[in-house]
Structure formats: structure tokens, C-alpha cells
């Protein structure tokens, strides 16, 4: 007689019973019997994580947001010279189709965008272009959505490239499983890792890797790229070096001119001295 084995680990229903706000929360305001406005927080569902509303608070760790900010800063800086390139972080993308109606990717890269001051949301049908590349960094509350549901739905709405930095812990140490997909005829096709365990982000021309459980990007010459703050510090350092070099050239030119003038003075004195003795 066979027996049914219970699944190991905490099931979704058990987890939500222990922590109703596992996915996050939404702030709502209602009026009580006396007409006073009352602030309430209602727990989010996995469907809310998939299609969040503006103002939803999805539970993510500080490391998650550090990784997302790093990717946003590096890619935006790398594409700064392309005026029609747009890089978004945690901004709603509305696809212009009934289902799924929208997502809020961690990082979205779009090309061919018309100039605009700010982007509280991006509407594909209105703008006439769709994201070329999306990156998600998983957290416990978003992992199932990022790995499964979004992979299916991003393909349905025509995303060419989808990359995932999947957060995992081994012996309490954070590691990242890097996953890349390219759009194929019937679904996303898995992209191979390089010998260094990195993914080539073809739309932006960068390598995606990791260092000590944190995302790291590299250029084609294998140089690790810093985030915006690091890039700005490097730029300022280079600017100071250029200014110091220019100042040194000016000083050297002044010294050379002064030396030439001194030589002319000595030659003139020598000619006068010879004239007095003739």
C-alpha cells in the first residue's frame, strides 16, 4: 500500500497564516461609522506582486534594493550617450493588452523612446516601443513570480530578453543564480553562462556577474563597473587629474618662456659687453 508523502518545508498557506504580510501591504483609507477617516493596511497577495498598484509596499530586503539600484545606475550611465535609451527601476509598464495588463520590473531597458521629463509609468501602446530587456532580482516574496509567472507573461507581451538574479542562501551566505532568456519561436530560450559564470547582456553590451553574493557588471574589457556614485567619483578624479595635467603644462610653458627670455637677455648683455670693448 502506497502512502502519500507530505511536501517538505512550509507551504504557501501555512506561511501566510504565520505571516499574512509576507508579500507586503497596501495602505487604504476608509470612513468609520462616525465618518472619520481610518487608515488600514491590507496584506498583498502573490497576484498583487505580479501586478502591483501604485503605492503597494512589496517586501524586499535591503540587499535586493542595493542590487537593483546598482544595476540601474550602471546601465543608465553606460547608455547615457544614447539619447533615445530609457532605463527604469520599479516603474509600472503597461503593455496595452488585456492580460497581463501591467508589471513593475526591477530594471527595464527601452530603446527608441521620445524625450520626456519623467516617467511615473510607461505605456507601450502610447509610446510605440516596448522594453528590449528586463532584469528581476528575486526575494523570498517575489521568487515564484519572477521565476515562473513573469517568464511566461514577459514572453506573451513580446519582451526579447529577460534576465534574473536569483537570490539564494547556502549556509546563511547569500549567493546569486544568474539566469538569462532570449526570445525564441515558442518560448524563451535559456542563455549559457560564460566560463566566469557570467551572462552577456546583449542589448546593453555588458556582462552580468556577481561578487560576494552581490550583482556586478563588467565591460567587454573585463573591467568591473561601479555604481553611479563610484562612476561619479572616478569621473571627478579623472577631471582633477586632467586639470592638474593642464596646469602642469601651463606652468611648464611659462617656465620655458621665462628661460627663453632669460637667454635672450643674456645674449643681449653679451652683445653690449662686446660692443663696449671694441
Image (cartoon, rainbow, N blue to C red):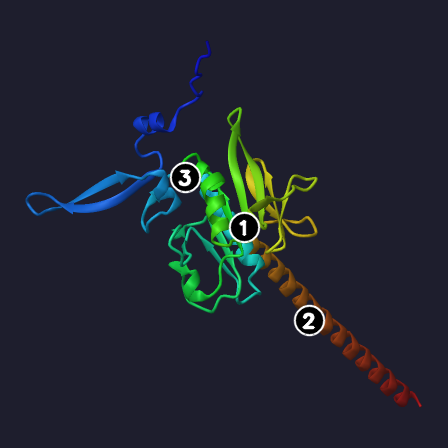
Is 68 or 273 nearer to us in this picture?
A: 68
Q: Nearer the viewer, mark 1 or mark 2?
A: 1
What's the residue at 63%, 65% (across, down)? 243
Give the mark nearer the N terminus: 1 vs 2. 1
Are circles 2 and 3 on residues that touch, CB within 8 Å? no
Q: Nearer the viewer, mark 3 or mark 1?
A: 3
| SS under mark 1 | loop
Give the mark nearer the N terminus: 3 vs 1. 3
Give the labeled residue for mark 3: 60
Give the labeled residue for mark 1: 227
- Which numbered dot is residue 250? 2
Tell me if residue 4 comes above or below residue 41 in the rendering.
Answer: above
- Mark 1 is surrounded, within 10 Å at the Cα level, by few (under 14), some (14 to 19) or many (20 or more) other residues, namely many
Distance in Å between CA atoms under marks 1 and 2: 34 Å
Residue 265 appearing in the image: yes
What's the residue at 41%, 61% (across, down)? 123
What's the residue at 87%, 86% (across, down)? 271
Distance in Å between CA atoms under marks 2 and 3: 54 Å
Amino acid at each position: 500500500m502506497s502512502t502519500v508523502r507530505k511536501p517538505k518545508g512550509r507551504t504557501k498557506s501555512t506561511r501566510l497564516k504565520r505571516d499574512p504580510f509576507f508579500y507586503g501591504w497596501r495602505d487604504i483609507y476608509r470612513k468609520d461609522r462616525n465618518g472619520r477617516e481610518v487608515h488600514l493596511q491590507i496584506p498583498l497577495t502573490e497576484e498583487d506582486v505580479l501586478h502591483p498598484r501604485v503605492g503597494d509596499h512589496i517586501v524586499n530586503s535591503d540587499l535586493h534594493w542595493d542590487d537593483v539600484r546598482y544595476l540601474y545606475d550602471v546601465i543608465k550611465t553606460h547608455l547615457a550617450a544614447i539619447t533615445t535609451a530609457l532605463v527604469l527601476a520599479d516603474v509600472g509598464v503597461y503593455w496595452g493588452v488585456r492580460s497581463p495588463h501591467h508589471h513593475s520590473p526591477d530594471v527595464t531597458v527601452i530603446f527608441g523612446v521620445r524625450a520626456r521629463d519623467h516617467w511615473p509609468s510607461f505605456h507601450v501602446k502610447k509610446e510605440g516601443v516596448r522594453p528590449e530587456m528586463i532584469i528581476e532580482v528575486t526575494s523570498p516574496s517575489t521568487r515564484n513570480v519572477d521565476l515562473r509567472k513573469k517568464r511566461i507573461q514577459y514572453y506573451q507581451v513580446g519582451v526579447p530578453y529577460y534576465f534574473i538574479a536569483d537570490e539564494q542562501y547556502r549556509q546563511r551566505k547569500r549567493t546569486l543564480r544568474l539566469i538569462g532568456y532570449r526570445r525564441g519561436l515558442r518560448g524563451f530560450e535559456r542563455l549559457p553562462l560564460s566560463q566566469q559564470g557570467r551572462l552577456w547582456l546583449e542589448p546593453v553590451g555588458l556582462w552580468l556577474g556577481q561578487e560576494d553574493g552581490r550583482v556586478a557588471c563588467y565591460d567587454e574589457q573585463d573591467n568591473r563597473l561601479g555604481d553611479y556614485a563610484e562612476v561619479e567619483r572616478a569621473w571627478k578624479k579623472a577631471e582633477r587629474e586632467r586639470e592638474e595635467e593642464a596646469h602642469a603644462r601651463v606652468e611648464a610653458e611659462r617656465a620655458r618662456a621665462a628661460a627663453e627670455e632669460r637667454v635672450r637677455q643674456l645674449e643681449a648683455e653679451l652683445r653690449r659687453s662686446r660692443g663696449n670693448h671694441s
